[in-house]
Image (cartoon, rainbow, N blue to C red):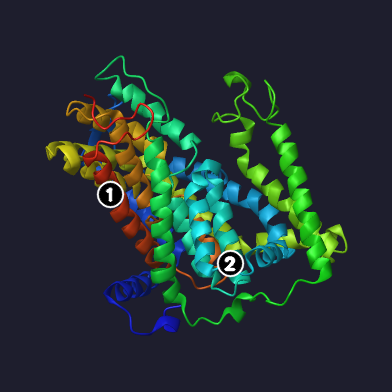
Amino acid sequence: MVEATEKKQGFFGGFLTWIERTGNKLPDPVTLFVILAVVVLVVSWLCSIFGVTAVHPGTGKTLEAINLLSKEGFRRMWSGAVTNFSGFAPMGIVLVAVIGTGVAEKSGFLAALMQKMLTGIPPTLVTLIIVFISVNGNVAGDSAFVIMPPLAAATYLSMGRNPMVGMFTAFASVAAGFCAAVVLALTDTLAYGFTEPAARMIDPAYAASPAINYYFLIASCIVLTIVGTFVSEKIVAPRFAGVDLNKYGKVDQKALTPAEEKGVKYALRGLAVAAIVIVLLCLGSDPFLGDPAQGGSITSANAPFMSGLVVTIAILFFVPGCIYGFVSGKYKNDKQMFADITDAFRDMAPYIVLCFFCAQFTTYFGWSNLGVIVAVKGAEVLKALNFTGIPLLIGVVVVSCIINLFIGSASAKWAILAPVFVPMLMLMNMNPAVTQIAYRIGDSITNPLSPLFYYFPVILGFARRYEKDTGMGTIIANMIPFSFWFTIFWLIQLVAWVMMDLPLGPGGAIWLS
């Protein structure tokens, strides 16, 4: 890709090309994760020797750096290698989703659907739609990381555009804009679950709702959609100019055949039926997909609908893909269909190998307590700077960004930081709602830049389906523009909101009084 864009470019474009080249000179990602795992082992040993500790602000418990080079650490690593791998959450989500998306893609359904729907629509408008849906992807939980990149890639390819641009645009929008949404999602509930107890350390009567950031996040969707579209079209897409699309299996732009037209029609009908069935399973006082412990709620964390969302999405891809394949004549029997599913899994083989080593590294990092210690120390540094007002909020964003590079779980980070930041800002007359949104901004914008992020291997695996030699440098170079401009405009929005004293959501004022 770098060679294809050897043309006059500005400073920023040249910087991204340097990042890509430098990053791709690093060892293979598998080797890199092995190296990082060794680094964690050595650092855990050194921190243990020097007695590095931190006090968890929520529990008051002293956390010590755990030496993984000890005999006990060695035993733990040796016996836990398999369970580390099998318990690596992103891998299970990806492989289940592939059952559905594999059929939808390999049968030709996605390409045919995109060709039928997008004919005559300006490419920029398609990008805007992809960015908007992706930014709202957290409504579907982590499934969006698995569904949107390959779907966007297929969409771009069906339009005669580079699929890598669509893939990177979707992933960056899902990851860097993860907290924004036009409807309340589980992420709002999870964040508020740590905010309220932290606020009650100062005000025992404090009570609000998970909607305290809702107005701000709706506006964020609009801002990030516009910014993301601009970045994709004006910064990322030109970097892929001149690449021969034929090597990606470029979709023939000729009109669909009558059999393909019929296949799309029946596939959409099948999709509608599948969706109706799922909706029916969510209705009633005690629905099949509801959580009986929460009065039948389908949105609680333990509800089958939410915990099995990836299964739902896999079904909604599998049904129309299967119907299209048989109606269009692509499949003559079930053996051909399952051969396509097998082929889709074969495409993910490099990703599965990568997951094994990534799982070991992330698990070692968690066992060592290094991530938690970094988070606590970072919060202490911010507190010691004695910032106030808007500079303090920006400081919360920056610290959250940095810590986000080391700890993937949003709830784990906020469990550590909320007991520090929320009371601290409340004593400066700032509502917990504004502290929470500052954290959530920082927790989102560096997601696509961190190799420690659970879904970084996912986008690397997807990219290698099109470009076999894609390295971490290519991923990071194409994520930086999104993270950079999302940061700039999100901070502008936050500062403007504070200066105009606008409510962040129901019960979410800027100031306490």
Residue type highlighted by circle 2: Ile
| Image point (11%, 37%), residue name | 386
Instruction: Using the numbered discs, state the Cα–Cα distance from disc 1 to disc 2 in whole angstroms.
Output: 33 Å
Residue 392: x percent and y percent?
Answer: 19, 40
Q: Quadrant of residue 86?
A: top right
Q: Residues within 10 Å of mark 2 (few under 14, many from 20)?
A: few
Residue 1: x percent and y percent?
Answer: 46, 78
Residue 374: x percent and y percent?
Answer: 27, 42
Label whose residue precedes the other's in the sequence (1 or 2): 2
Residue with the mark numbered 1: 491
Residue type highlighted by circle 1: Leu
Q: Is residue 298 above or below residue 441?
A: above
> Circle 2 — which element?
loop
Q: Name the foreground residue: 68 vs 157.
A: 157
Mark 1 and 2 residues: CB-CB less than 8 Å, in contact?
no
453 displayed left or right of 277: left
Residue 23: x percent and y percent?
Answer: 37, 69
Residue with the mark numbered 2: 121
Q: Name the foreground residue: 473 vs 64.
A: 473
